[in-house]
Image (cartoon, rainbow, N blue to C red):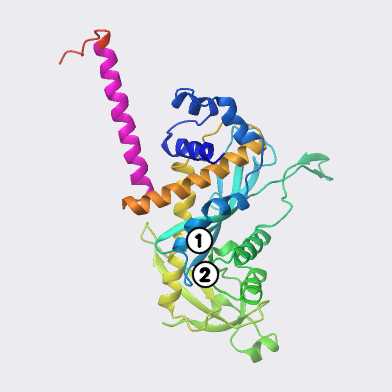
Amino acid sequence: MNNLIDLYTDYLLSSFGQTTATGLSRLIDNHISHDKITRLLSTQDFDSKDLWKMIKRDIRKIESENGLLIFDDTIEEKPHTQENDVICWHYDHSKGKSIKGVNIVTCLYNSSGLSLPISFEVITKPISYDIETQKSVRNKSDVTKNDILCNMLNVAVKNQVKFSCVLADIWYSSSKNMKYIVKTIKKDFVMPVKNNRLVALSKKDKNSNNFVNIKSLKWQDKPVKVWMKGVPFELLIHKQVFRNKDNSIGFIYLATNNLDYTKEDMETLYKKRWSIEVFHKTLKQNTSLAKSPTKVARTQKNHIFMSILASVKLELLSFRDKRNHFSLKMKLYTKAIKSAFKELKRIKKKYGVEELPA
């Protein structure tokens, strides 16, 4: 089983087109039948527990008390694939509309210069009945992404993963998540919050329900201590100003429960959240996430699992080879093109196909 998983994930890393059981079998000169590869993807359900079993040894080698847990989700568009529990409609904040595809929530562990996924959840939307339209629709998951985050945190603690702080983007900065991180698992967090959140500047103001909009605060060169509505402990808020690629000025409000952090601490920590963006980009561009043409939900989920496992390989190889994911993938691509070019020359010579005149 593990040898076949290793083979399939290598195939995902080295492939530049569609990935199929037949394609892998052909690649290895049919030494393993495509039926055996198909059975790997269609006869059991691979999930986060399996991922943890396979990467636990690597995590133990790199973990530290200052490790970070980073959360985010990504959508891979699959507009031409038949709709099912996995391939369904999700709202994409970057596009401002719902798109059909796969939605994956990931927990990434960052420590010792490496970022490895330790758990994931594919958002499924079983069929429900819309009373108003009297139609069957797939518009709601059985669990929320915030519930998934809390569950992943709980699993990380049970697995005794060492970490000090949780990082997530603005969509996960709910009061519920903040309370769970601080009160239940007793860790720190750094997350941006929306500019319509209400805060009080003292406990007395909080008890008097004297809240103001976060945008109305007078921002200076250091973070401000506040009591946020719905959060039972004091927070530190920092307005981080930055310049966008188009030279425009933007800002976010970073929040943390660690009152000893400086603005530099908050900015440095939150910057490390970017590693999960790189991870999701790698899934889409380097580990063949969307390259499987299968139409069966179980096989699609198992292919996603294999793609995530392939990203672990790529991260470990990248760290040792001193190249980023995309440079390493380009190295493979260049080698493949050179091999194909050499073979083409051989075939042309064999059949006496002359070069075009200069």
Name the amino acid, label 2: Phe
Q: Does the magenta run of residues contain 326?
A: yes
Secondary-structure class at tag 2:
loop
Question: Residue 8, image x and y in percent?
Answer: 50, 36
Residue 181, disc: none
Asked whether disc 2 touches disc 1, contact meaning CB atoms under 8 Å apart, the reply is: yes
Where are the magenta residues, as a range? Answer: 325-349
Q: Residues within 10 Å of mark 2 (few under 14, many from 20)?
A: many
Quadrant housing the C terminus: top left
Question: Residue 29, image x and y in percent?
Answer: 45, 23
> Is residue 323 among what the camera can see?
no
Q: Farthest residue toward the top?
A: 352
Question: Residue 220, image x and y in percent?
Answer: 44, 83
Q: Nearer the viewer, residue 23 or 281?
A: 23
Q: Nearer the viewer, residue 151 or 54?
A: 54
Name the amino acid, label 1: Tyr
Q: Is residue 198 above or below residue 43?
A: below
Magenta segment, prevailing SS (helix, strand or loop):
helix
Q: Residue at x 48, y 77 (%)?
A: 238
Q: Farthest residue toward the bottom?
A: 204
Q: Residue at x 57, y 31 (%)?
A: 37
Quadrant housing the N terminus: top right
Residue 109, disc: 1
Q: Residue at x 47, y 72 (%)?
A: 66
Q: Earlier in the sequence, mark 2 or mark 1?
A: 1
Q: Nearer the viewer, residue 161 or 277?
A: 161
The residue carrying mark 2 is: 163
Q: Is residue 5 above or below residue 213?
A: above
Q: Is residue 229 above or below residue 308?
A: below
